[in-house]
Amino acid sequence: MDAWTLDLTVQDLMTDFMMISILLLVGVVLRRRVQLLQRFLIPSSLIAGFIGLFLGREALQLLPIDPERMGVWVYHLLALTFICVGFLRTDRKQPGAAIHLGLLQVAVMCMQGIIGLSIALLAAATLFPEVNPAMGMLLPLGFAMGPGIAYTIGQSWADFGFESGGSIGLTIAAIGFLIAYGFGMLLINRREDAPAWNDIPEHIRTGIRAPGTGIEGSKLTFSGASVETLAVHIALIGAVYWLTWWACVGLANLLTTAGLASQVSIVWSFHFIIANLLALAIKATLFRSNAGRWVDQGTLHRLTGSFTEFLIVASIMGISLSFTIQAVIPLLLMVGVGGYVTYLFIKWVSAKVFSAHQFERFISMFAQMTGTISSGLTLLRVTDPEFRLPVAQELVIASGLTFAFAFPLLVLINLPFTVFNGSTGGFLLTMGLMAGYLALVLVGWYTWQRRSEQK
């Protein structure tokens, strides 16, 4: 796969790292100084990514930023992030609200997939015959699942003739971030009881904590006389990624031997899931022994966040404007309709299902289903600065549940290529299966709610 075989010199590698790092620092400074960015709580990584996009080769050509190489960074950072997530301890409690939020996420993903496919198929059949209907399946990937998954799976479709899949997936994710923060903050400010700007903690507005107000982020679980704690955790992640590579190689060889060589690219596109499963298995082994106490959860959280920040910067800079412009009208129609339906459905469900903290659950879920869980938590902090409400924990638990329920969707999304060779009939069947899965989720959700009320 290109992400593993792309020729890179050491200069290329270090140039990318330096550019991403410098731009991230610029983003931090701009978030600290520019009030407009503060008003919409635009993350520093998002600011950095858009600056890099317009200064790079796709626009002003002032920085040596190669979108193809940025895609490689996104691919690998996604897996590293999922390895970290696999090692994190999770709360086994599953309160009713978290289950509601998890099922809500899956339902929204199905809706986004159906909307995206409908618009893409209509565009391809009428005014835009050059549009690949697969573009529609990137809507739930870019909106609900984030830039890493959107790029990784979209890029795997290049082997089936959809060469712009990865870039369009990143574009949808970037627009989703703007919707999450821009429209999300407008919704918050429209409330009658919206918090006054000065009442929002300064570190949330500026992104920087004042001296003396820092909080403990991690603990040293190893002696510095022997080895640095951070180095051990990075080494553990690297070791799991090495196992991930061998697992993917083994699966690819099995498929080739079985005469299914055309499916190999799908294996490499799901490498992040394999990485996560391996991390979960190793965590279960470590935590059964004393070795588990050496794995510091704070350090893992810091690494997860760090990988994610670099991933977001790279994902924006990995957008190919030339590919995006070719399909700009159906693309804007997809994200516009998809975003509005997402807003309406989540708002309606929040009013019907939740008796308390309706707005907090609505706004955080809307931001998450157009951005990432970080987007949801960021907007939640505006109305619940200290996370005193249970909503933040519910979001985290719900995300774990969603991962299991959403896996069939990832399988369905690949069907038009893996089974039907990109035919229109394959896309129509996939849309029908998504509608069927949506109906199944809604019926199961309703049945579970009714039984819960009777207890």
Image (cartoon, rainbow, N blue to C red):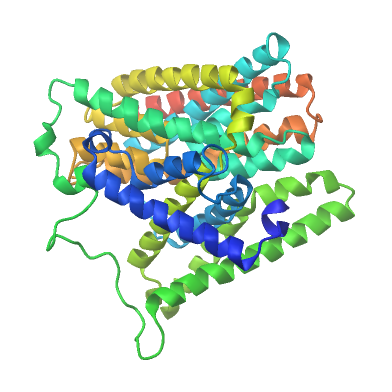
Residue 53: give x, y in percent of width and height.
49, 41
Q: Is residue 323 above or below residue 6?
A: above
Residue 181: give x, y in percent of width and height.
33, 32
Q: Is residue 93 visible?
A: no
Residue 269: give x, y in percent of width and height.
66, 47
Quadrant assignment, res 370: top left
Check the picture and name the quadrant holding the C terminus: top left
Image label count:
0
Q: Choose between 341 and 163: the one closer to the eye.
A: 163
Residue 158: give x, y in percent of width and height.
73, 39
Quadrant assignment, res 281: bottom right
Q: Give left or right: position of 256 versus 193.
A: right
Q: Is residue 60 visible?
A: yes
Q: Give left or right: position of 223 versus 80.
A: left
Q: Is residue 309 above or below residue 42?
A: below
Who's the residue at 51% across and 55% down the image? 82
Q: Name the residue furthest top.
A: 126
Q: Name the residue furthest bottom.
A: 225
Q: Choose between 11 and 223: the one closer to the eye.
A: 11
Who's the residue at 21% across and 29% down the image? 356
Q: Is residue 268 above or below residue 133?
A: below
Who's the residue at 20% across and 25% down the image? 189
